[in-house]
Image: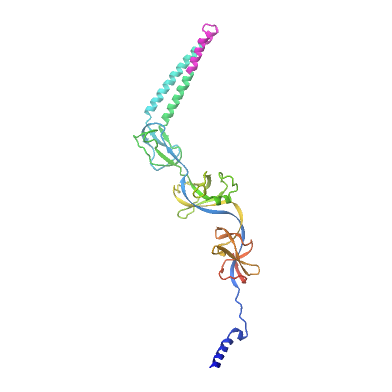
Amino acid sequence: MQKLFFYLLLALVCFQPSCQGGKSSPAAPLQIEVATAREDSITMRYSFATHLQYNYEVIIEPRVNGYLMRQHYADGQKVRRGTLLYEIDASLLRTSLLSAEAELASAIAERESARSDYERAIPLARIEAISSSQLDAYRASAASADSRVKAAREQVESARLQVGYTRIYAPISGIIAHSNAHAGDYVGPGTQFSTLTTIVQTDTLTADIAIPTSLYMRYKNDASSTIDNSTLLSDIRLHLANGEEYPYTGRYDYTRQSISPTSGTITIVVDFPNPDNRLKMGEYGQIECGIGQRQRVLMVPQQAVSTQQEIHSVWVIRPDSTAEWREVELGEAVGGEWIILKGIERGERVAVEGLQKLRNGERVIPKTEK
């Protein structure tokens, strides 16, 4: 029985490759796809959530008091600059204008009389027919008459302006809101209807970009000035709430004066043209833009980078086609690539597949190169 067990054990051992006179063949090298770490000149791009606002609005207020006679627009319509909006009853103001014109005519007549008296008094004073004090009185009377004419003329101009203010025109082009007052209402300063309506400019909308101060200071060349940031942003793109990219690019407008104490951000305001009124106030979107100047960076495909427990690494394929695990420091993600700040050099090759199968020193066969 013991002999039988021995022979069976011997048979099992002899069936191993070593007993068959051969050695175990090594595993074939792994064929993998690789990519070369490349250097590129790029502008870093970032995304910011925002909502759109009208560039500005104008409040329409009457400058004179009176009864509203006519409204010449429909609520909510688009109006052009110079469009007649309202007419206020100008009867009393026209009466004031006529009275001022009459006062002016009377003042002019008095001035002519005073001038004539003064001119006749001059030769009389030369022959001492009248005293010098009388001549001075004629001169003062003529000067006073000139002053009364000037004052009367100013009253006429003021009265004409008051009459002109009874016709209210649109100061800008835009969308006009509903009217607070209607025909027959008494409107004007100090009344219930001191404000008639508002017009919002729609051909340009603005959006705020709240940039964290740490990010801002990283790319701001002149750190001493946070007022002018006209060269900080580039290629400003707006993505609407439905994911569609707005066809018009934005432009820098201005930088708000204060830094937000709650979020620690600097707010930059940008404009977007709105020629077809496609954008609406309050609409939310995503702004993507370049920040700072172009810079040289090292990049590899994102699939070449592994992350475990906050440690980022790549497999470098050395010139002898062996794999080497390498820890790297990542920058920003750009498209389908990572910026590598530290860990590899330009021109080194990295594996972009089979990362879980590789071991240090393992020989590989680069299949294709991205």
Q: On screen, 129 above or below 342?
A: above
Q: Would you identify the image quadrant in which residue 356 lies?
A: bottom right
Nearest the viewer among 222 and 339 is: 222
Q: Position of residue 238 (x, y in %)?
A: 50, 51
| Residue 10 coordinates in the image, percent (x, y) | 58, 89
User: Would residue 197 be seen by someone viewing this image from the given angle?
Assistant: yes
Quadrant for the C terminus, please.
Answer: bottom right
Q: Is residue 100 left or right of residue 13?
A: left
Seen in the picture, residue 162 relative to 118 is either above or below; the reply is: below
Q: Which residues are drawn in magenta? A: 121-145
Q: What residue do we see at 58% from left, 86% from top?
A: 13
Examine the image and state in which quarter residue 319 appears.
bottom right
Residue name at image x 42 percent, y 40 percent: 198
> Looking at the picture, how far across and down is residue 110, in whole percent?
45, 16
Look at 60% across and 84% down and name the residue there. 17
Residue at the extreme left of the image, as rendered: 184
11 magenta-colored = no
Q: Residue at x 46, y 46 (%)?
A: 53
Whole-percent x and y of residue 168?
42, 34
The residue closer to the viewer here, 261 or 186, is 261
Dominant SS in magenta: helix
Q: Judge by depth and name the residue closer to the eye, 329 or 230.
A: 329
